[in-house]
């Protein structure tokens, strides 16, 4: 399936893409989230979308669990490691003059800490880092629409990069090109993917197209 998506992306000029939006965990960082552990700590069933599940709880219960989730995510942010090719890719795009944004389902303060931990914060203007309190979480494309509006950019000029279905769905709904970064579990979503790469190292050749 990766080969199929690369052939599809061969018809896309990535050199014309000046606006890049990245997911954070598992995309710019090595994936370390243990969702079974997180759900046990939150005393909720193992669900695909923890945020949506918490939103359905009574507010008093949800508040307690959100606070614990924030603690877990802060701890993970302090342990974050950059994924293969992440910092090099950001540096290359930054030096080319591209606008860079973060769209994460984490809280913004966690995103800022994570970026500092992996020494990538200098590539992002603070106002271009959006978390779940700033915009509706992915797969809602609201965050992408917001960044494109701030940048005065057309979706055809933009790329959404992520490792999970929600990232790709958000990008597709917003009309951007979508790039899927490989996952340890091998899951992929070709229907929502314009280019699939094993790591961010593999993006470099497409910048010269």
Image (cartoon, grey):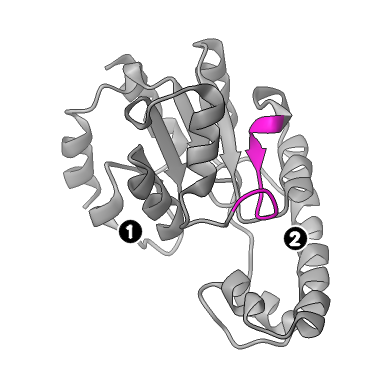
Q: Position of residue 15 (x, y in %)?
A: 34, 17
| Left or right of residue 176: residue 33 | right
Q: Is residue 205 above or below residue 72?
A: above
Dot 2, crowdedness within 10 Å: few (<14), some or many (≥20)? some
Per the rendering, the mark at residue 73 is: 2
Name the residue located 49 percent from the left edge and 11 percent from the top edge.
Answer: 96
| Left or right of residue 134: residue 146 | left
| Left or right of residue 71: residue 37 | left
Name the residue located 60 percent from the left edge and 79 percent from the top edge.
Answer: 53
Residue 1 can be seen, yes or no: yes
Q: How many marks?
A: 2
Residue 120 can be seen, yes or no: no
Q: Position of residue 112 (x, y in %)?
A: 76, 40
Q: Which residues are magenta?
A: 127-135
Magenta span contains residue 15: no
- Classify residue 150 by image quadrant: top right
Q: Position of residue 8 (x, y in %)?
A: 17, 38
Per the rendering, the mark at residue 96 is: none
Q: Earlier in the sequence, mark 1 or mark 2?
A: 2
Q: Is residue 7 above or below residue 190?
A: above
Q: Is residue 49 above or below residue 76?
A: below
Q: Where is mark 1, residue-wise?
A: 188
Name the residue located 71 percent from the left edge and 23 percent from the top edge.
Answer: 122
Dot 1: element: loop
Mark 1 to mark 2: distance in Å? 25 Å
Dot 2: element: helix
Contact check, label 1 and label 2, Cβ < 8 Å: no
């Amino acid at each position: 399936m990766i080969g199929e998506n690369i052939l599809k992306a061969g018809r896309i000029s990535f050199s014309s893409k000046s606006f890049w939006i990245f997911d954070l965990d598992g995309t710019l960082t090595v994936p370390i989230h243990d969702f079974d552990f997180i759900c046990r700590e939150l005393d909720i069933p193992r669900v695909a979308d923890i945020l949506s599940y918490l939103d359905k709880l009574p507010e008093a219960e949800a508040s307690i669990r959100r606070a614990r989730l924030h603690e877990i995510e802060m701890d993970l942010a302090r342990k974050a490691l950059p994924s293969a090719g992440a910092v090099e890719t950001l540096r290359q795009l930054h030096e080319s003059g591209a606008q860079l944004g973060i769209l994460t389902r984490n809280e913004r303060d966690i995103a800022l800490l994570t970026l500092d931990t992996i020494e990538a914060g200098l590539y992002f203007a603070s106002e271009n880092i959006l978390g779940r309190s700033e915009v509706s979480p992915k797969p809602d494309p609201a965050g992408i629409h917001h960044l494109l509006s701030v940048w005065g950019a057309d979706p055809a000029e933009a790329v959404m990069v992520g490792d999970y279905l929600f990232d790709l769905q958000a990008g597709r709904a917003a009309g951007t090109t979508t790039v899927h970064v490989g996952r340890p579990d091998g899951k992929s979503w070709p229907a929502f993917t314009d280019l699939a790469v094993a790591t961010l190292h593999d993006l470099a050749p497409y910048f010269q197209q």
